[in-house]
Image (cartoon, rainbow, N blue to C red):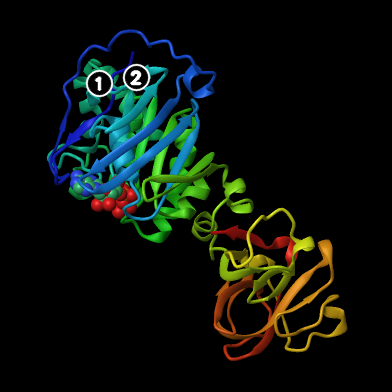
Amino acid sequence: MRAPDVLTSSASGSEIVPAADTAAGPAAAAVDSGSAALSDGGLVLRGIRRLFGDVVALDGVDLAVTRGESLVVLGPSGSGKSTLLRIIAGLDHADEGEVLIGGRDQIGLPPHRRDIAIVFQHFALYPHLTALRNITLGLRHGLRLDPAAADRRARDVAGRLQITELLDRLPRQLSGGQRQRVALARALARQAGVVLLDEPLSGLDAQLRQSLRIEIAGRLRAAGATTVHVTHDQIDAMATADRIAVLRDGRLEQVGTPDELYHHPRTAFVAGFIGSPPMNLMAADHTHDGWRTPLGLVHHPDLPGRPAADGDGVTVGIRPEHLRVSGPNPKAGDGPWRSGDGETSGTGAEARVSAPAVVSLVVPAGPEKIVHLDASGTAMAARCAADVPLRPGAEVTVTAPVADLHIFVL
Ligand SMILES: Nc1ncnc2c1ncn2[C@@H]1O[C@H](COP(=O)(O)OP(=O)(O)OP(=O)(O)O)[C@@H](O)[C@H]1O
Ligand SMILES: [Mg+2]
């Protein structure tokens, strides 16, 4: 069994020492579950709860990551992402719950006995060691590889991450992105069963993030690594995840593929967190004949299957690409609807709602423009063709097909 690549960090995260190596423990305990993640050597979390005084950092987190899968935990600052990774790594304990890797209970196992590698949010390399020595140190002392074998393995990973020419440099002679690749090489060289990444791209400029996110995703995939990557950046998440788990205040809101979360968000929080620009969310009311939205009345038969009581508050969402912006008095050829003040037209799949709006900002985005609108006090963004002749202050009509609306009952 492989030894893990765990670096125990001081409270400040600035001093890092490699954990001592010990022999692996007993064979995996039998676990009575049909979960693929259990049978194939993946990672399973059950009912993880962590309290810091009054703060509930994690509140019953259940997750299964199958072998070779890339799972991204996406959530805002303070949602519990780092705490979750630290518990998986054994650097923090759960007050309740189970962590299983390959079916084997990890609770009580020290970090160095877990088959994991971790790249920290604030990655740290030993400043007095070259990049090569930073990578080989854990291989020699943790995995007990002989110097030649450690060197070979480090150079192989370095070649794949395109840092071979940097191996003789000290960390201070490397850029942030290069240091991050060395830290990643150190983690990958361990060939651990589970790789944990805590915002590995934070602090890098946008261009470097873009190229590294593709590179890291590709490398981890090629290595067949089981990864749990935590980030607050939905673009990182969409680009690298097989599945995304959205974390909010220590609870999982939804777990699904990037497409599932984009097209079928279960909550307004998920809808507003994913997409760039994110889904437009508007307050609406439930009345006896339909949903009263800022864009018009949505008749119940046109958007069935959303039970709610009269007077219930709801949030209505629509993606920017589903909004249509036209002149204040659309011509006949613009579509089968008329402009109006919260006007509704058509029925069933053809139903549309529309309202007057004023353009507040136009942001060019290459092949398209993001047009920000104010519809009687409700802000929304629409994706438009790059050649739409719209300027701030223009009076327009904004129209939404009812079939593209999402209703979130509060
Ligand atoms: N050692 C600690 N003592 C007290 N509270 C803590 C401790 N560690 C974390 N917390 C609290 O637990 C919650 C989750 O923190 P965590 O660091 O896991 O968030 P995060 O999602 O990683 O945030 P960020 O995106 O800012 O890194 C926060 O409210 C945080 O203040
Ligand atoms: Mg964090």
Return the residue nearer the eye: 46 or 71.
46
CB at disc 2 and ligand 1 closer than 8 Å: no
User: Residue 105 — which label?
Assistant: 2
* Residue at mark 1 to residue at mark 2: CA–CA distance: 8 Å
Q: What residue sits 77% from the left and 84% below the top?
A: 339
Percent of width and height locating residue 142 = 22, 21
The three-letter amino acid code for the residue at tag 1 is Leu
Residue 246 located left or right of residue 26: right
Tag 2 secondary structure: strand
| Residue 405 in view, yes or no | yes
Q: What residue sits 26% from the left and 20% below the top?
A: 113
Residue 259 located left or right of residue 68: right
Percent of width and height locating residue 20 = 16, 22
Return the residue nearer the eye: 289 or 17.
289
Percent of width and height locating residue 71 = 47, 38
Q: Mark 1–mark 2 contact, CB under 8 Å?
A: yes
The three-letter amino acid code for the residue at tag 2 is Asp
Q: Is residue 246 above or below residue 222?
A: below
Residue at the extreme top of the image, as rendered: 27
Residue 292 located left or right of residue 253: right
Q: Residues within 10 Å of mark 2 (few under 14, many from 20)?
A: some
Q: What residue sits 43% from the left and 41% below the top?
A: 216
Tag 1 secondary structure: loop
Q: Can you say which quadrant of the picture contains the N terminus?
A: top left
Percent of width and height locating residue 285 = 61, 70
Q: How many marks?
A: 2
Q: Is residue 217 above or below residue 283?
A: above
Q: Is residue 407 above or below residue 97?
A: below
Q: What residue sits 28% from the left and 36% below the top?
A: 86
Disc 1: which residue: 109
